[in-house]
Amino acid sequence: MEDVAVRLISRFGPEAAGWLAEVPAVAARLASRWGLVLGELFESGASSVVMRCRWPDGTRAVLKFSPDRALLTKQAEMLGLFAPTGRVPAVLAADAEAGAMVLEEVRPGTEAEDLPPESLPQQWGELHAVTPPVSWPLDLRGRYEEAFARIGRRLSEPAIGARIDRDTWQRAMRRCETLLDTQSRKVLLHGDLHLGNVLDGGPSRGLVAIDPKACIGDPCFDAVDYVVAAAGQEGVEARCQRVATACGLDGDRLYAWAQVIAPWWPSRTSPTTARNRRSTNCSP
């Protein structure tokens, strides 16, 4: 749990330590209410704690907690938006007050970065085939304002400041504003579609996306993390063209989004993905 504590405290502040200490008791209480058998911890992300569990009939599931109860409740709603596609895990139970929900466990669950690369570009384009809801309040501009503010506060940290200087940061922000101002086609985006958030759902299901931050905006955005992940492998430009062709995207806009993301990309990815990737270079 030590790594989990470090990530949560970095995200939510020192009070997250007290919240984390209560998780075992809350998990036991919910397990008793829902009839769950608790299992081991997953490698949780920066904003949650996730553990395996089983229903009384043996069905595999995961129990997820977050100190940001409002975020987790909103995420359950977001998963509902994408549910008709079958490309997200089903929400099986939720408790907003506890900041917890039970999700279908995606099987086999291999992360996208560990899958054979040949079919991924086409499958990536199938992950946001949802008409935007008329009343959905969150858009890509707001997503970026939050992200730039959150990561911008960390520029003074040695690990972040060593690879992002202020000029690079300002240039990324200007490029982002230009792209946001020129959006034409908009779709319902997952909003955080890095390779650690895309799992193998098996041959009959295809890719499954977890942990959405759903917002409405440029369809290129949900492909950009997959494109930037090619740095040090096939190359960002080559993958950009393959993905744009496979997904019916504007290749120039996709590459422009890659230039926005590249300076701060490791801060967006899962801990596993970030450790396994080389530094990006999209001429920031």
Image (cartoon, rainbow, N blue to C red):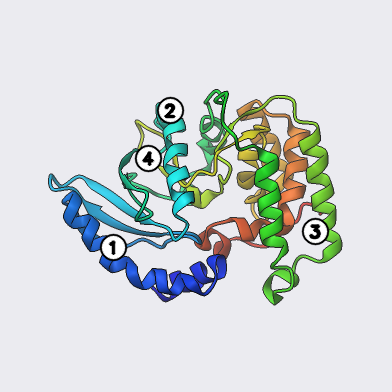
Quadrant, the N terminus: bottom left
- Identify the residue position indicated by label 4 in the image: 89
Instruction: Choose mark 1 or mark 2, whichever is in front.
Output: 1
* Foreground pick, 222 / 120: 222
Lower sequence index among marks 1 and 4: 1
Quadrant, the C terminus: bottom right
Instruction: Choose mark 1 or mark 4, whichever is in front.
Output: 1
Find the distance from the CA under tag 1 to the CA under tag 3. 40 Å
Find the distance from the CA under tag 3 to the CA under tag 2. 36 Å
Please report the residue visible at 24 percent of the width from the left and 48 percent of the height from the top: 60
Find the distance from the CA under tag 2 to the CA under tag 4. 10 Å
* Foreground pick, 146 / 169: 146
- Kind of element beneath mark 1: helix
Instruction: Choose mark 1 or mark 3, whichever is in front.
Output: 1
Residue 137 percent coordinates (x, y):
59, 34
Find the distance from the CA under tag 1 to the CA under tag 2. 32 Å
Amino acid type shown at disc 1: Val
Residue 29 percent coordinates (x, y):
22, 60
- Identify the residue position indicated by label 1 in the image: 26
Quadrant of res 214: top right
